[in-house]
Image: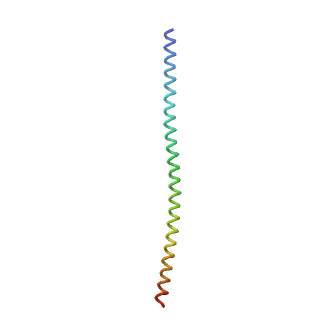
Amino acid sequence: MRICVALTVCALALGLGACKGRDSEGRGGSAAREAGRAAYTLSRKSKEAARKAARELREAGREARQGWKEGEREARKKGEK
């Protein structure tokens, strides 16, 4: 009877230990997976923000160039008169 109880206790201890090990690995993997997803989402958002900033800078450059050309034309007109 003692042997049977000892074997049962050992089997339960090993079984619970195995479940605990898998559970902690699963949590670690899950946390790592969530961190990876968050990093991916952040990288996509930053890429989109960089594209938007590039478009805005390009447009600002165009406007500055147009203003420069207009100022040059006005200066020429004033110089001719």
Q: How many marks?
A: 0
User: Is 74 or 25 nearer to us in this picture?
Assistant: 74
Q: Is residue 7 above or below residue 39?
A: above
Please tell me which residue lies in front, 67 or 31. 67
The residue shown at (49%, 22%) is: 14
Seen at 49% across and 87% down, the residue is 77
Seen in the picture, residue 43 relative to 6 is either above or below; the reply is below
**Residue closest to the eye, 13 or 77:** 77
Query: Of 34 and 66, which appears nearest the observer?
Result: 66
Give residue 9's position: percent from left, percent from top.
Answer: 50, 17
| Residue at the far bottom in the pictured view | 81
- The picture places residue 5, in percent across and down from the top left corner, at 51, 12
- Residue shown at 48% from the left, 81% from the top: 72
Q: Is residue 28 above or below residue 3?
A: below
Q: Is residue 69 positioned above or below 2 on the image?
A: below
Q: Residue at the top extreme?
A: 1
Question: Measured from the top left, where is residue 50 in percent x and y?
Answer: 50, 59
Q: Position of residue 2 (x, y in %)?
A: 49, 9
Display coloring: rainbow
Give me the residue at 51% from left, 31% from top.
23
